[in-house]
Amino acid sequence: MLHFPDDAAVASTPFFDAIVVAADWQHRFSEAVNLGAEAGVYVAGRGRLTAKIAFPIESVGDQQADLGSGSRPPSFFYAFSAGFAVVRTPTFALSPGLMFARTDVGDYGSMLGLSFPLDWVTKSGLRLGLEAGVGNAFGGRSPVNCATAADCNQRLRYQDRQSGVALWLQFQIGFGFNHPGPLPPSADPPS
């Protein structure tokens, strides 16, 4: 049976993954399916840094929109995460940390939270994983619908969005470069 170094999962670096993301930011939007990519690296066998981008495959609606108003739908989401590998084995790594995410439309604000990535790495360097992020959605603004006909002739007004719970759930599949080869077989002691 082949044996790999104890830290083989985090030694597969840098890595590139295709991702499927579900995002729900309270008072902003709820988007079930986004497709994208992630690039990452393990630093010194413990630090995990990633950058990701995802594109909605359906129209995203503004949760605070009044009839006929609302912010322009986002075209893409982007996020960054930094974590520390608290568990690392030849085939698995758990690297909890922090995540920051935004859209290309500033009206929706940002997300800052904790991330919990689970990475499984095969003997060939193929990567499968899940990442859950939970935190706070903050900032942004939403258009205010006019109350009377006179209001409609004035310039569009905005109000600040309330803070709320933000969720990010991601599945990834990809490949890690520089995956270590198997260890040489240990010699049996002479009898």
Image: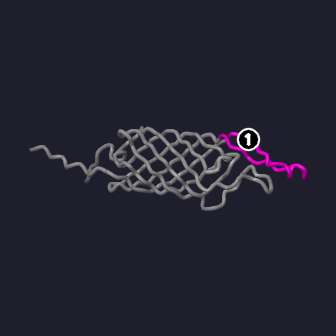
Provide the secondary structure element on which disc 1 rests.
Answer: strand
- Give the residue number, with chain letter if any, for mark 1: 160
Point out residue 30 in the picture as x, y percentages from the top left corner.
Answer: 66, 52
Residue 190 position by quadrant? top left
| Relative to 148, 59 lies left or right | left
Q: Nearer the viewer, residue 171 or 137?
A: 137
Asked if residue 53 lies in the magenta stretch, the reply is: no
Query: Of the residues shown, which amino acid type is indicated by label 1?
Result: Asp
Point out residue 74 in the picture as x, y percentages from the top left corner.
Answer: 64, 54
Residue that sits furthest to the left in the current view: 191
| Relative to 59, 66 lies left or right | right
The residue that appears at 33% across and 47% down in the rendered structure is 8
Q: For label 1, count other residues whose C-alpha is less than 10 Å away and answer few (under 14), some (14-19) or many (20+).
A: some
Q: Nearer the viewer, residue 127 or 146?
A: 146
The residue that appears at 50% across and 50% down in the rendered structure is 52
Classify 180 as above or below 46: below
